Image (cartoon, helix red, strand yellow):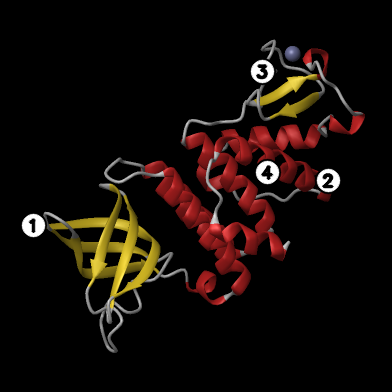
Amino acid sequence: MLGEITGMVLMSTEVGDYDRRLVILTKERGKLTAFARGARRPNSPLTASCQPFTYGRFTLHMGRDSNHVKTFEVDHYFQEVKQDLEAYAYGSYLCEMADYLTHEGLNDTEQLKLLYVTLRAIEKHKIPYPLIRRIYELRALAIDGEEIQVFSCVKCGKEGTAYVFRERAGGLICVDHCMQMSEERDILDGSTVYTLQYILSTPLERLYTFIVSEKVQMELDRICTAYMQEYVDKPFKSVDFLNSLS
Ligand SMILES: [Zn+2]
């Protein structure tokens, strides 16, 4: 059976002498694994396309045990992401996280759209990569059903004026309801709260259009690191390298 799908290559690994095994996040069938026979032979039409980040339309032969890529018409190579070491590291991290958050056969168009616009932001490089990373993490976890509560206090439901972040509680707590207010510096900057609210409510096409102060970036780093530790039970291979860059 032949099927046509649209999607993005998340991972591409070498198998056998000449082949590749691809993990593709697709619009129509969620995540799937497919083999690209001969993709590592010189002059194979699949050589350039069967790389991470490549987005386009595939025809697949869908067999009982495995899928095989027959043709791949590329819409976007994300060449700039592939060619720059730092951009590549961030791109790889996004793909690894997308792979973690999606499942074979389950439709996940929202994750695919988010990944696409995020790679576009890396490619354009108008806003810093560390900020892109945090925006992506917050939105990807929200799509996955783990949205941080940032619009009101998790404890009392009221909109406060000063908040602290508690990953265990799943979001912001107004200072009046925070039992263990350890230190003053725990209180989030108002701009950080606004940034979190913006990230979690703005349409995808306007997601990567702002920059933040150093202080806000530091608070986003602290919040996302703690939240990821709480809700993602897998260490990502690409994260060590990423952290070594910042
Ligand atoms: Zn409260």
Looking at the rendered image, the quarter that the C terminus falls into is: bottom right
Residue at 56% across, 50% down: 235
Task: Please give the residue where the numbered disc 4 appears in the rendered image.
Answer: 225
Given the image, on which type of amino acid does mark 2 rest? Answer: Lys
Q: Is mark 4 within 8 Å of ligand 1?
A: no
Q: Nearer the viewer, mark 4 or mark 1?
A: 4
Residue located beneath label 1 in the image: 1
Q: Earlier in the sequence, mark 4 or mark 1?
A: 1
Tag 2 residue: 215
Q: Which residue is mark 3?
A: 154
Is the residue indicated by label 2 positioned so its CB lies within 8 Å of ligand 1?
A: no
Residue under the point 27% across and 81% down = 18
Q: Pointer 4: residues within 10 angstroms few (<14), some, or many (20+)? A: some
Instruction: Give residue 22's quadrant in the image.
Output: bottom left
User: What separation in Å lies between label 1 and label 3 (alpha carbons)?
Assistant: 50 Å
Give the residue type at disc 1. Answer: Met
